[in-house]
């Protein structure tokens, strides 16, 4: 039986793109489902809007709930506030600002970044910025890609021109604390590298403190949930 190494999301996506010649690329998680016509709708949108480098469709959970797949690049204050309070009070103002929840998602708009759970990319833009950074094994590679697209002069948009369904993977749901740790590692890499020069270097310790707080909050949350399950 053939065994394949897990390359990580970004590296695997780059390999898939390299094997195609399509001008419009749709990259998605394995647990994303596409209604008929949704891929064509995203490709048509890219064709008709030549400055759009990446497009994120409307994404729903299988039960119909909206996934917050279009987000902002958070300020340091927003990042720390979301990290510390997001699991306990998801309606806090920092999390709402980061997740763009105070918007009905029934209209198209430019956003800072869109989720790699499903996004359409213009090959020209993707190739220009070098694709996904393979340094990320999982998480934040979509944030990094969209940041580089903006820096290269492309735009990133959310558009309900297409709607897909994404079921969060079983491995993520079964090991939420491990996923928070991996996410924090990727965020630390993202901010440490992007804030490596100039005055922003002074912000890195505060960002790391916020990430540590997020991991500790996740550990506490996981422990409390485990205790409540144990007593049930």
Image: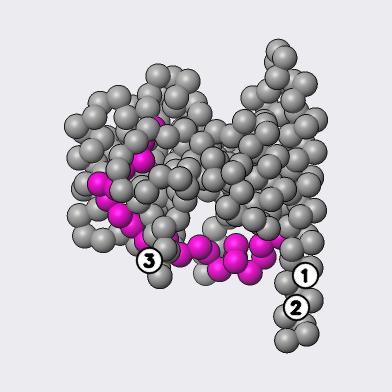
> Looking at the image, which residue sits at the far top?
198
Residue 110 place in picture, x, y as percent? 37, 32
Within the image, what quadrant is residue 185 found in? top right
Q: Find disc 3 in the rendering and name its residue.
A: 64
In the figure, is residue 109 to the left or right of 197? Answer: left
Residue 125 place in picture, x, y as percent? 37, 27
Residue positioned 74% across, 63% down in the render: 221
Q: Mark 3 and 1 residues: CB-CB less than 8 Å, in contact?
A: no
Verify whether residue 131 appears in magenta.
Answer: no
Q: Mark 2 and 1 residues: CB-CB less than 8 Å, in contact?
A: yes
Q: Disc 3 to disc 1, how far (Cα)?
A: 28 Å
From this view, report whether residue 160 is shown above or below residue 225.
above
What residue range appears in magenta?
Answer: 156-177
Question: Helix or strand or loop: what does disc 2 sit on?
Answer: helix
In the figure, is residue 25 to the left or right of 100? Answer: left
Question: Helix or strand or loop: what does disc 1 sit on?
Answer: helix
Q: Disc 2 to disc 1, how far (Cα)?
A: 6 Å
From this view, report whether residue 130 is shown above or below residue 8.
above
Q: Mark 2 and 3 residues: CB-CB less than 8 Å, in contact?
A: no
From this view, report whether residue 128 is shown above or below residue 189.
above
Between 33 and 68, the residue placed more toward the observer is 68
Question: Helix or strand or loop: what does disc 3 sit on?
Answer: loop
Which of disc 1 and disc 3 is earlier in sequence?
3
Residue 64 place in picture, x, y as percent? 38, 66
Residue positioned 74% across, 25% down in the render: 203
Q: Say the numbered circle drawn on residue 224.
A: 1
Q: Find disc 2 in the rendering and name its residue.
A: 228
Q: Is residue 56 visible?
A: yes
- What colour scheme was applied to this rendering of the protein? one colour
């Amino acid at each position: 039986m053939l065994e394949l190494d897990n390359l990580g999301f970004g590296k695997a996506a780059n390999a898939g793109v390299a094997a195609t010649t399509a001008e419009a690329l749709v990259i998605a998680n394995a647990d994303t489902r596409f209604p008929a016509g949704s891929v064509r709708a995203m490709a048509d949108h890219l064709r008709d809007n030549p400055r759009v480098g990446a497009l994120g469709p409307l994404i729903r959970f299988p039960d119909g709930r909206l996934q917050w797949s279009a987000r902002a690049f958070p300020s340091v204050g927003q990042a720390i506030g979301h990290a510390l309070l997001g699991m306990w009070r998801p309606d806090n103002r920092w999390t709402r600002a980061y997740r763009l929840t105070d918007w009905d998602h029934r209209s198209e708009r430019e956003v800072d970044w869109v989720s790699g759970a499903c996004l359409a990319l213009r090959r020209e833009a993707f190739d220009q910025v070098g694709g996904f950074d393979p340094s990320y094994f999982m998480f934040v590679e979509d944030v990094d890609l969209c940041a580089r697209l903006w820096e290269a002069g492309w735009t990133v948009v959310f558009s309900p021109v297409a709607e897909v369904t994404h079921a969060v993977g079983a491995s993520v749901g079964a090991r939420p604390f491990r996923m928070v740790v991996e996410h924090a590692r990727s965020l630390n890499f993202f901010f440490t590298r992007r804030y490596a020069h100039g005055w922003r270097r002074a912000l890195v310790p505060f960002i790391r403190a916020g990430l540590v707080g997020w991991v500790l909050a996740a550990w506490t949350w996981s422990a409390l949930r485990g205790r409540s399950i144990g007593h049930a």
